[in-house]
Image: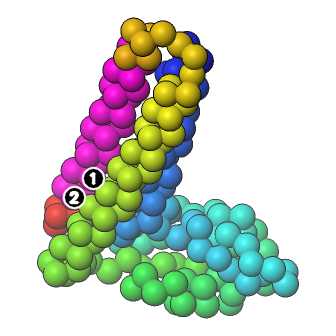
Amino acid sequence: MDDLTSQYAPKFQKVIDVVKQDLATIRTGKASPQLIENLMVDAYGAKMRLIELSTIAATDPTTLLVTPFDQGNIEAIVKAVGEANLGLTATPEEPKIRVVVPALSEERRQEYVKLAKTKVEGGKVMVRQVRHEAMEDIGRSSLDEDTQKRMEKELQNLTDKSVAELELMVAEKEKELLTV
């Protein structure tokens, strides 16, 4: 129990990774494979992620090229992109699919900034939950009071570092969204 950082640091990092992945799904004015790689596609009688069925590349700031491993999945991929409600247009161009990412209006950019901030707030809540769990573990331990105080301080430093990283992520995403 003495090395609290090694026990709880991976949990804090996992929260940060989850929020980072979540922020990657928020569309900016630029085409990015992360926008669509986790879309669920009906293929082979099951739901599969797009990244499992194809390669995705950004050819320019407004276009993604999806190259299916199996040409029989082109229709299913086009349908999945259309149903994803991301405002993207998928056009089949055998043997690839061109996905056009339209420019965002100022109003839509502001909505996405709010969404990014909401996602990061959720991440902060998760960080606080991990901190709370660790504090309970410290309280239940049979360690002397000085050691418990030192561990609580260490835990607070880890929490502060995680929250600062989340704040930096949302600031970067906001800058990316508001850059025309």
Q: Identify the residue shown where x is 50% and y is 62%.
A: 33
Secondary structure beneath disc 2? helix
Overall secondary structure of the magenta section: helix
Residue under label 1, please give it.
170
Task: Determine if the magenta segment contains residue 172.
Answer: yes
Q: Identify the residue shown where x is 67% and y is 69%.
A: 49
Q: Quadrant of residue 173?
A: bottom left
Depicted 10 relative to depicted 35: above or below: above
Q: Along the line of sight, which residue is nearer the eye, 25 or 159?
A: 159
Query: Is residue 101 at all visible to an observer of this figure?
Result: yes
Residue 170: x percent and y percent?
27, 53
Q: Along the line of sight, which residue is nearer the eye, 50 or 108?
A: 108
| Amino acid tagged 1 | Val
Q: Quadrant of the N terminus?
A: top right
Q: Quadrant of the C terminus?
A: bottom left
**Residues drawn in magenta:** 150-175
Task: Determine if the magenta segment contains residue 30.
Answer: no
Residue 174: x percent and y percent?
21, 58
Q: Is residue 115 left or right of residue 32?
A: left
Say few, some or many: other residues with alpha carbon within 10 Å of mark 2 (under 14 / 14 to 19 / 20 or more).
some
Q: Identify the residue shown where x is 39% and y is 9%.
A: 146
Mark 1 and mark 2 in contact? Answer it, CB < 8 Å: yes
User: Residue 174, which numbered label?
Assistant: 2
Q: Along the line of sight, which residue is nearer the eye, 87 or 23?
A: 23
| Amino acid tagged 2 | Glu
Secondary structure beneath disc 1? helix
Q: Identify the residue shown where x is 65% and y is 70%.
A: 50
